[in-house]
Structures are given as structure tokens and as C-alpha cells.
Image (cartoon, coloured by chain):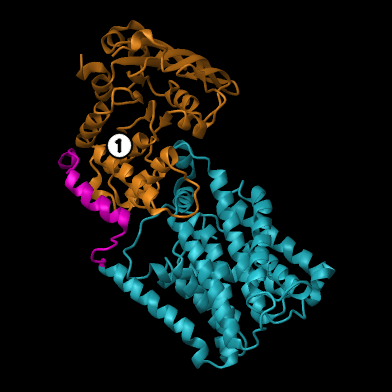
Amino acid sequence: MMRSKAQPRPSAADRTGASASTGGGRRHLPRPVLVSRVALGLALLVLAALPLFLAPYPIGLAGRILAFALLVVSVDLLTGVTGMPTLGQVAYFGTGAYAAGLVGIHMDSSAVLQLLVGSAAAALLALLTGAVAVRTSGIVFLMVTLAIGELVHRFADSFAPVGASNGLAGIPPISILPGGEPLELAGFIYWWVLAVFLLGMAVATLVVKSPLGRSMRGVRDGEKRLHALGQQTYPVKLAAYTIAGGLAGAAGTAWVAQTRFFSPGDLGFDVAAFALLSVVLGGAGTLWGPVIGAFVVILVRDWLSAYVDGRGALMLGVLFVVAVYTLPRGIAGARWRKPLRRPRRTSP
Amino acid sequence: MTGEELEPILRLEGLTLRYGALTAVDHVDLSIREGARHALIGPNGAGKSSLFSVVAGAVRATEGRVILGGKDISSLNESGRARVGLVRTFQHSSLFLGVSVLDNVRLAVERAHGRPKRPWPMPRTDRVITEKAMSHLGAVGLVDRCNALCGALSHGERRQLEVAMVLACDPRLVLFDEPTAGMSAAETQRFSELVESLPAEITTVVVEHDLDVVFRLADRVSVLAAGRLIADGSPDEVRADAAVKEAYLGKPRSAEPLFGGIS
């Protein structure tokens, strides 16, 4: 076995090298890629067509799910891709939401402007807090991010300019561009939220496919090994943290665009816990898995709970226990993937 | 090889490592010329691993200097030393198990030739990185495993992958920490061939228990005992050295298999 591999095989190198680098471009797509592209196209079609079928309340729910899903993706970038389980993304989610709301009230109702300001504010806060937080790892990092989330929560709870514990109310309806027509219909707002979600997913996908994404997975699988290769891991972790913070901020702006109200309760510990739960449920490390996890979590909490006497959280607990036993690698890791062997990580 | 008259690639000056009262490495002076196939041996507890850690930068020396190619690198940490060309391997394979074999090498290539922190993909640049990574995989014979998950490799294959990653770092000097520990005879053979086939300009230092491997690979052997360097010379000189024999044989309870099979 070993000796048969002694000679390098240039022909094999060309073949596998080419397919690995072009991702199977012009030629025949491998079947799994084809299947997943068709599935992705169908999912996009369904998501875009939802306002044509659903009543305003379910549409609002779908929009909130999408905003929450983007928050979950930002958690997954840290937890699943970089191996840094976090409870602090709600802080940046809230920062984005409050920043967008303040812009809406005091400056302009343009959703594009709110998105830019909200994401930038969240990314900046993530850069500043991350500079300290990413020096730690594992359970300590989890606790530090929990503290960051709680600090921002407490601050929002007592800071008058954002409405303190009453929440930030009176946010005018968004328009797409500055001075544009305000969007009143739930369907149009939903499409804006969908656009933000898709933009965020695109950013996350690009980052994951980039050299930085590879370095992030390197941090997850062997930070010491990365050191030995000559790479400093602190900038990698800080970059990941900042990008994830910006995405969480974008999710916050999308959230507030439809609720037009944001209170400290929207960035409480339970939201952070649900986000982490969605990642675990969906399958940490993939991006689409946690999105499905977010759908399941919000549907169970907000929709199914109406049928079980408002005990949504209890249902989630049951769901989580069942999922841990039946889908140890999350929805994304179920059956249709070969079991992967992975080194033990600190699990939340 | 014309390295004799040149500045040695690696020079250790009075390198000392103390853990409290225990002196693990005791004033080690050592020069390794460029292109050498150097081996570091010694009985259990001689301080080989400690010396290895200090040279690799994993542990800061208590005293003394580490000089690579005339440049004092004592103050650099592990990643800094890797960037100036002093690259180590790990005793227990330490790879990125959750990503593909190709990605493992790409991580190394990216650090040496690319921009490992660029947060967006660039197909053309990334293809160059991939081609470099594939050529390193070719050099160790792992091309047909490039898409496998690293965690699915056998122990020997992981060792081959380690070598590919080390090569991808453009090293001037490679430190191997007991590379054949836990390998089957065939894997050891394969690994020895691999190290022998490394380009001559790459200096290798092997810390090794398996003396067959040492005397096969090394053109120079240093012997460490109780933290001190007790012998340094060609394999034949070391084999004949009285102090070395005492270090290995002199202790009544020493159970090390000796040079019996070779000399």
C-alpha cells in the first residue's frame, strides 16, 4: 500500500488538481453539486414567492425567521467554522438594530443607509470587543462573549436615547433609497429582508471559501499547528469576529426594518441561546444547516407554541434532546453525508 | 556539499532551559551546517524534547541564543521562527483533521506564498496556490488522496502529509520530532525514503528513538544525556564514543536497545 504511492503520479495530479481548482466548472457537474444547486434554486424561488401566497402575519414571521437566520449564520461563522462557541452575537445584533432605528428616527428612512450604518456600527463594536475576547478560547471565550452580550443588554436597558427598558419605538417605515416611497406592505418589507439575508449569506459564503475561511478552519482544527506553519492566529480570529459582528448587525437592521420597534428583550440571553441552539441543531460548520436550524427553532417557538398553550421553550427543549440523540451532527450532518471524524471540540 | 566553510545554518549558544530547580537543557552549544542530515539522540529523559521545544520556539529558553543563518532568532515565537524558515513537525501527528488533505497543504502554501487573511476568494490566485499544494502532495505521493478528509488518513499517510506541509512552508531547516514513532516497519521505510529525498538545501534535524533510522538518515549525530551534549560527530565516531556507551549502557537499569543491530 505505502510503496505503491512512492511515485508521484502526474496524470492523477493533473486530473484531480484541475477538478479541485475549478470546482468542476464547465464540464459535467458531479451529481451532489447538481442536486444541491437545484435544491438551492428551488429554495430561493419559494422564499421569493412567499409574499404572493401568505397573509401578512405569516409573512412577518417568515421575515423574522430570515433576520434571525442571518444572526445564526454569524454565530455559526464563529462557532462552527472558527471553533469559537459564542453567546455574544446578540450584542452586535442589537447594535445593528438600534443604530438602524436611530438612523430611521433622526436621519433618514432609507433601508440601504440603515443597513450600512447598522452593519458598520456592529462591526466596529465587534472589532473593539473582539480585540479582547479572541485572546481567550473555548469555555473562557464562551463566558467572555456571554458577558459582552449581557453588558450590551444591560446598557440598552438603561440608556435613555435608545428608549431604555421601554425599547426604541416610533421608527418610521423604511424606504429603499433616501427620500424614496416608504414601504408599508408586509410583502415588500419581506423582500428587503430577504435581500439582506441573501447578501449576508453571500458574504458568509465568500468568506468561508476564501483563504481567511481556510485559516479559520485551521484555527478550529489545530491552532497550535497553524502557529507551527508560521501563521499568527490572533488576526485571523479577530477578522472572523469582526465579520461575524457585521453580519449580526446586518441581521439586526433587517429585524428592525419589519418590527419597527426594538427593546432590550430582543437581545436577551434567550435569543443568544436560541441562536446557538439553531447552530447545533442545524449542524455547525456548514452555512445552510444552521439556516434550517433557525427556521425550525423560530417555527417551534412562535408558531407551534400557539398550539401547545404557549410552551414553545419547552418544545424546544424536547426538540433539542431528540436532535442530540438522533442527529448528533445536526440536520446538515444527517444521513446524506458520510460521518466525518473530527477532533473533539469544546461543545457549548 | 560546500557547507563546511560557511556560517552554520543553525547555531545554539549556551542554550539552557530550567524548570525551577530542574535543568532540562544545560548549556548546549551546537552548530549545524547547511544541508546537514543531523540527528539528535539520547536516552530517555536526556532532554531531547526540551531542547527540541526550545529550538522550535514553543518554549522560551532560560539562557542562551538560537541563531539561524547568522540571525539571532531567540526572541521569536514559534510562528515567527517558522516564517524565517525554521519549521517543526509534531511527535503526534498534528493536522487539521476536519478539512481535506488538499486544504491542509493549502493552508501551509497560503502562509508562505499567499495572503492567508484575504477574506474573499480569487479564483486565479487560488488556483496557483492549489497547484503548488498539489505539487507538494505529489512529492510525498499523496496526490490521489487530495480530496479525502484528513481525519480519514492512516497514520503513515498523515506523516507523509506532515512532510508535504513542511515542504510547503519553504523551510531552510526542518525539525522532526520522533517522526517514526508508532510507525510500522514499512511506513518507517517509506518515511526514511521521503526524508532522504528532501532537497539538499533543506537541513534536517531529527530527534529519534529508532537508532536504525538515525544511522540511516544522519550524516552527523549529537548525543544528549542529562541535558548536556556529550558527543557530536559522524555516526561512526558517536558509535565508538565512550561517553555515549556509558550514557546508554552504564546505567544498570537502562533497557534501551542499543547499537547492537548495527555495529
Magenta segment includes A12: yes
The x, y position of residue B215, in whole percent, is 25, 19
Closer-to-camera residue (B244/A263):
A263
Q: Is residue A230 above or below residue A173?
A: above
- The magenta segment: A1-30
From this viewpoint, which residue is outermost toward the right? A160
Closer-to-camera residue (B243/A331):
A331
- The crowd level at tag 1 (other Cα within 10 Å; few <14, some 14-19, many 20+) is few
Residue topped by disc 1: B182
Please state the chain letter of the residue tagged with numbered disc 1 in the rendered image. B
Q: Can residue A18 be seen here?
A: yes
Identify by letter the chain in orange: B
Give the residue displayed 37% in from the left and 13% down from the top: B247
For the C terminus of chain B, give its image quadrant.
Answer: top left
The x, y position of residue A298, in whole percent, is 56, 79
Q: Identify which amino acid the numbered label 1 is placed on.
A: Gly
